[in-house]
Image (cartoon, rainbow, N blue to C red):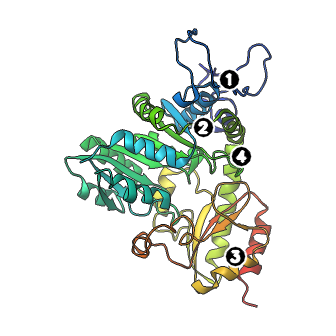
Amino acid sequence: MNQIEGIHPLRPSTLCLHAGTYLDKPTGGACSPVFTSTAYAFPNPANQNIYPRYFNTPNQQVIASKLAALEKGEAAVVFGSGMAAISTLLLAHLKPGDHAIFQNDLYGGTVQFITQELTRLGMEVSWGANAADFAAAVRPETRVIYVESPSNPLLHCVDLVAVAALGERHRVLTVIDNTFATPINQNPLTLGMDAVIHSATKYLNGHSDVNAGIVVASAEIVRRVTASAVNFGGMLGAHACAQLERGLKTLALRVQRHNENGLALAQFLQAHPAVARVNYPGLPTHPDHALAARQMHGFGGMLSFELRQPGQVDRLLTRLRIVMPALSLGGVESLVCVPSRTSHRTLSPAERQRAGISDGLVRVSVGIEDEADLREDFTQALATD
């Protein structure tokens, strides 16, 4: 299946294009064919029961191979959404009575799953901000430490080497949501983390037209996750896999532009009088800047900022002309949203306060437009006239 098997090491831009590609021998086509079938012959040369819900069709395997190569993992499994990946991994490793530790400021959907589903099923949870907090929370029944770095939407960064060491010391599975960083900007498995999750809906696809999720880890962890996934049924169909593969081919190029535009816009907003604070790990003023510089290869296209006057949020949204107020992130177009009303809307006011999500917080997914046009759009949208 892999056209480049045995040729190592290859760099990320090359892996984006060639890793995992299904070579169609009869035609020699440059692109993986789309296998639309839901019925595959048995017996077959591989002695496999091939079926979409078993996560082993050719198009699913193409994505898994490409992401495993990019994240430097042994194996991967592709899902129908980021939440399918998150929930399946957690449920595959937790049972009633087990304990898990989570970072305070996670994606709102993840927090909702933890507080509404894991606790209902009898799992116990603790929260923390950093490796020291996680270490203080470890119990004999702790099974998972779960982080998100940079985090959504405050762009906090966690010391992944320290978290990985903590997990190894206590034999606890360490998991990171690497969606904001992408495999281009950060490779947590090389820092000692056990499993990496992506909402592939975002940067991996990059064009705002596919929902998908990924788990990358050792072959043993992926086997365990896949065994649960088969029962839960959260697979990704062939056509969506093909779209995702196409998006992945330009991931390295897109992320380079996201990095450049993200830093430029963060610097611009930091100097704007209407902005109280900018959250972007590429700024030297960010509290986690030194850590991010140590464990990341680039700082990404995600940032958030606090308006000095929270009541001006709606005015900002209605005045933007190029940047689109919309849900989601990671596409080629620049998007903004208000986390208190979108990603963290289902949380209670107390939960949002604990997570640092204020009404004046605006999250920006910086796209690949011309940097000057983005600055000009925010200039006119933030103007007080």
Identified by mark 1, the residue type is Tyr
Q: Which residue is mark 4?
A: 253
Task: Please name the residue shown 62% across and 48% down the image.
Answer: 201
Relative to 347, is 181 on the left or the right?
Answer: right
Q: Nearer the viewer, mark 1 or mark 4?
A: 1
Secondary element at tag 2: loop
Q: In the drawing, what numbered circle is on residue 236?
A: 2
Question: Helix or strand or loop: what does disc 4 sit on?
Answer: helix
Q: Is residue 264 left or right of residue 370?
A: left
Q: Residues within 10 Å of mark 1 (few under 14, many from 20)?
A: many
State if disc 1 and disc 3 touch (CB < 8 Å): no
- Which residue position holds label 3? 317
The x, y position of residue 333, in whole percent, is 74, 58
Q: Is residue 128 visible in the rendered structure shown here? A: yes
Residue that lies at the very extreme toward the bottom in this rendered image: 385
Q: Secondary structure at mark 1?
A: loop
Crowd tier of the residue under label 4, counting other residues whose Cα lies within 10 Å: few below 14, some 14–19, many 20 or above: some
Mark 3 to mark 4 CA distance (whole Å)? 29 Å
